Amino acid sequence: MAKLKNNILVLHKSGANSHYKALELLAHNEGYTIIYREFSVLSRMFKSIIKLDFRLFIKQWKNLFTLLQLLFTSNEKIVLGIAPYDKTLLRLRNMLRGHQIYYHTSWPIWDGTHFPKKKGVNHKVKKEWKAFLEEQVKLVFAVTETAKESLKSNYNLKREPAVVGHAFHKINFFKVNDSIPVEGISFCYVGRLVEQKGVMELLEFFKGKNEVTFTIIGNGKLENEVKSFVDKYDHINYLPATHNRSVLNHLFNTTDYLVLNSKKTAKWQELFGMVIIEAMAAGCIPIATAHIGPKEIISDQHDGFLFQEEQFINNLSTFLNHKPSQELMKNAIKKAANYEINEVAKNWKDILKD
């Protein structure tokens, strides 16, 4: 079988290619190629047969071929993205033996008490994870400092984890010097239209504030509810989710504040917040709940604002009558520069060491 020489294999349950753009840049500059594969093969192959999805079927054969290939090769560079304490790891470990394993995670709590996938997790699974992290993983790439410190505190890792946040490209998100903000104070939300994002609370707050404008971009279960507010209130606007970065950059350039009213659940909180960085790069000031991700990015009252969930809506009123200062905007743009793709690519460099 052909070896994966000069390739870096990114192995995920269901793919997350957008998280690895900085790694792609580094790999390209150093003569490597990124190969994306998924390890959740059998369930997706069954799905492809049921739905007669030929493309999905072929994709699963590629995934299966690569996984089998790992059994007959060695010393390949593999970036593994898998949920903490996922029992699937027990099946994967044999395939990964003899390879250079780099574990990539955004999960912030590693004391074994709190994790999203609890079904089937027992002492044996946690023991396997401990052996995996301490003995098999060459280096952990953590998305946040919080994740890094928790891993260090709870496991005897071979090396201190490297922190690699998600990245944006400055050709996509930037401050347009001659951009003209909308008249009055403006707010926006960009993201999923689901309950844990606090969208309905935002709509209820802004519906009576016709002296400002509020724009929502996204899709999800609450889309019809959002549209009903738009039909009733002229100062509330809605656009479907878009991958057109010029549309988003224009929105951020002409809007004063980005609002993220995220709500913690038993299985979820805002672990990063790419939209925060994209907005800051264009000089749009983030106002967010103090979840782990926003706290990593935003320096409160210096380049954005952080509030506890129960205080968030009440504190929005303080932003209704004044635009952000030039200093605040400059600080936000400067902070975002830390997450520009060329900067983040440098943080992946240890993967190239043998």
Image: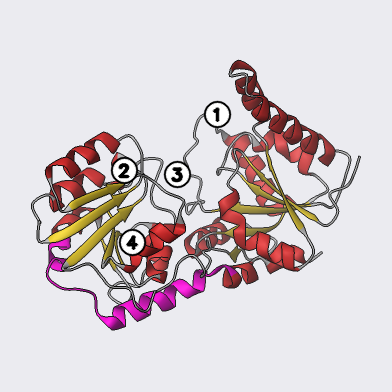
- Which residue in the protein does label 2 denote? 196
Look at the numbered disc 4 and give the secondary structure of its residue.
Answer: helix
Q: In the picture provided, is 35 more to the left or to the right than 160?
A: right
Q: Amino acid at mark 4?
A: Leu
Mark 2, secondary structure of its residue: helix
Give the residue pinned by disc 4.
251
Q: Nearer the viewer, mark 4 or mark 1?
A: 4
| Real-space Cα separation, disc 1 to disc 2, in angstroms | 26 Å
Rendering quarter of residue 73: top right
Earlier sequence position, callout 2 versus callout 4:
2
Instruction: Estimate the x, y position of residue 120 in percent, counting from the top left.
Output: 55, 29
Query: What secondary structure do most residues of the magenta stretch adopt?
Result: helix
Q: Is residue 332 magenta?
A: yes
**Disc 1/disc 3 C-alpha distance (Å):** 14 Å
- The residue at the point 89 percent across, 39 percent down is 72
- Mark 1 highlights which residue? 120
Comes first in the chain, label 1 or label 2: 1
Front of the two marks 3 and 2: 2
* Residue 19 image offset from top left, x and y in percent: 57, 54
Q: Quadrant of the C terminus?
A: bottom right
Amino acid at the residue labelled 1 = Gly
Residue 163 placement: quadrant: bottom right
Q: Return the disc, 3 or 4, that comes first in the chain's sequence.
A: 3
Image point 18% across, 58% down: which residue?
A: 213
Q: How many marks?
A: 4
Q: Earlier in the sequence, mark 1 or mark 3?
A: 3
Whether residues under marks 3 and 2 lie with C-beta atoms below 8 angstroms apart, the answer is: no
**Segment colored magenta:** 315-341
Lateral position of residue 117 relative to residue 267, left or right: right
Precedes in sequence: disc 3 or disc 2: 3
The residue type indicated by label 3 comes to His
Camera-near label (3 vs 4) is 4
